[in-house]
Image (spheres, grey):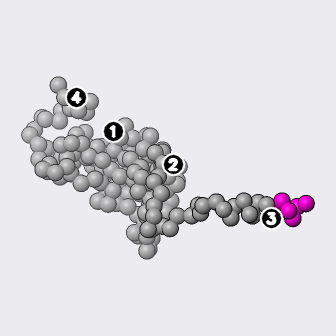
Amino acid sequence: MNLIRGFATTIKHVFEGPVTVQYPEQERPVRERFKGQHALKRYDNGLEKCIGCALCAAACPADAIWVEAAENTDEERYSPGERYAKTYEINMLRCIYCGYCEDACPTEAIVLEHEYRLSFSDRRDAIFTKDKLIDPSPPGVPATPQQTEPGVFTRSIPDMLDPK
C-alpha cells in the first residue's frame, strides 16, 4: 500500500511545472516587505538625513552598526541638524536584516532597500562605509558638504522641512 502511495505522489509531481528559477538569467520579484541592502537617504536639497544620533546602532541586536557624530558648521553643512554622521559603517557579515535600525531612526535616514545581490571577496569588503551607503544627490543639487548662510539652520528640523 505504501509503495503505491509513493508511486502516485511521484507520478502526480511529474506533470507539474518546474519550481526552480534559472538565476541570474531569471529573477523572481521580491516581496514588498523584503529587507535587503541598506541605504542612507538625502533630502531634496542634497543634505543628508542622518543626524548622527546613533539610535540605529543602539537598536541593532547584532551590534553591526558604528556611528561617529561630528558638529555641522555654516562652512561645512552635511545635515540640517546640529550634528551629522562623520563615520557610518555597517558590518554586513554581522547584520541579520531585522530592520530595527530602520524603525529606530527618527529622520528615516537608514532604509533597507530591495537589493539582495550582495557578495564579498574578503572581510573588508563586507564593511559598508558611508560612501557606499549614501544615495547620490538629486540632479542639479550640490552634494555635501554645503556652505550655508549663518543662522539659516537655527530653527528646529520639523520647521525646516515644513514648506510654509
* Dot 4 or dot 3, earlier in sequence: 3
Residue type at numbered disc 3? Phe
Q: Residue at x 46, y 45 (%)?
A: 32
* Dot 2 or dot 1, earlier in sequence: 2
Residue type at numbered disc 4? Asp
Examine the rendered structure and indicate whether residue 109 appears above or below residue 22: above
**Is disc 3 placed on a helix, strand or loop?**
helix
Q: Distance between the residues labelled 2 and 1?
A: 18 Å
Nearer the viewer's eye, disc 3 or disc 1?
A: 3
Asked if disc 2 and disc 1 are in contact, CB closer than 8 Å, the reply is no
Asked if disc 3 and disc 2 are in contact, CB closer than 8 Å, the reply is no
Judge the density around disc 4: few (<14), some (14-19), many (≥20) Cα neighbours within 10 Å: few
* Dot 3 or dot 2, earlier in sequence: 3
Q: Which of 108 and 54 is in front in this view?
A: 108
Residue type at numbered disc 1? Thr
Read off the magenta span.
1-7
Q: How far apart are marks 3 and 2 (CA)?
A: 42 Å
